Amino acid sequence: MWIRQANDTFRFPVFPASFEINSKAIVNTSNVLKTGEIAVFGGAGLRTTEISSFFPKNDEASYCDYTGFPTPYDCVNKIQKWMNEGFILRFTVTETNINMEVIIDSFKYEEKDCTGDVYFTLSLKEYKRIQIPKLNSVSTNTNLSSSKDVPITKGFETKKQRTHKVVKGDNLWSLSQKYYGNGDLYEKIVEANKELIKTADIIKEGWVLTIP
């Protein structure tokens, strides 16, 4: 079970005991003279899901799906940030048909049993992109020629800035080759990190460089 925001991917360390996807149809009712009440289909409603699990303090416990995940409150802080900033997230559950854009509707957490584990309930609501009609600039009539998907909150597709933490053996040419497929484009990295890089052929281990 994963949530992704741009290049920031979070995998839940403990898979919930159960989860469900709630979906519904929008049905509008009206009263028609001499006919009575009628129902009109208004489209599909937004899907929702609620996840209840916990962030364990011990990442080597047998019930953990993997090791090396963040501490419980690092997990809490990440989810709260995504909720407070209104990010569009990609929610996926492998080996299922669940793969959709969502926003966080609510998030609550607590500690109990003095274990250091943090129990949480996370509510997600499906996000649908609106379509803004675009006028044909060539034609003078009022026909709409095309439309464009536009996110109405901060989107995971709009945040494209990358970073790289310098490790032993890195150099600007190798980073340019890694990210652009061409080592000769290293000057793009230099330009984006002018506050750190004073000499074009010197980068230091531990630096976090912006990769434009």
Image: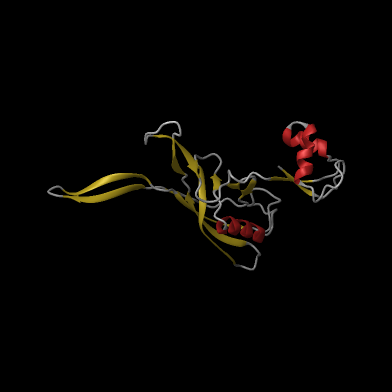
Residue found 55% across the figure and 52% down from its top: 16
Give x and y (percent) for residue 83: 55, 57
Closest to the observer: 199 or 50? Answer: 199
Residue found 45% across the figure and 42% down from its top: 132
Query: Furthest-front residue in view?
Result: 140
Image height check: is 109 above or below 180? below
Residue found 85% across the figure and 45% down from its top: 203
Closest to the observer: 135 or 206? Answer: 135
Q: How many marks?
A: 0
Q: Is residue 61 left or right of residue 193?
A: left
Give x and y (percent) for residue 84: 56, 59
Q: Is residue 210 left or right of residue 120?
A: right
Give x and y (percent) for residue 105: 49, 57
Closest to the observer: 72 or 196? Answer: 196
State the quadrant of the C terminus.
top right
Q: Quadrant of residue 90?
A: top right
Look at the image and name its color scheme: secondary structure
Q: Is residue 80 left or right of residue 40?
A: right
Query: Furthest-left residue in view?
Result: 34
Give x and y (percent) for residue 113: 61, 67
Q: Quadrant of residue 55?
A: bottom right
Image height check: is 31 above or below 180? below
Closest to the observer: 71 or 162? Answer: 162
Residue found 59% across the figure and 45% down from its top: 158
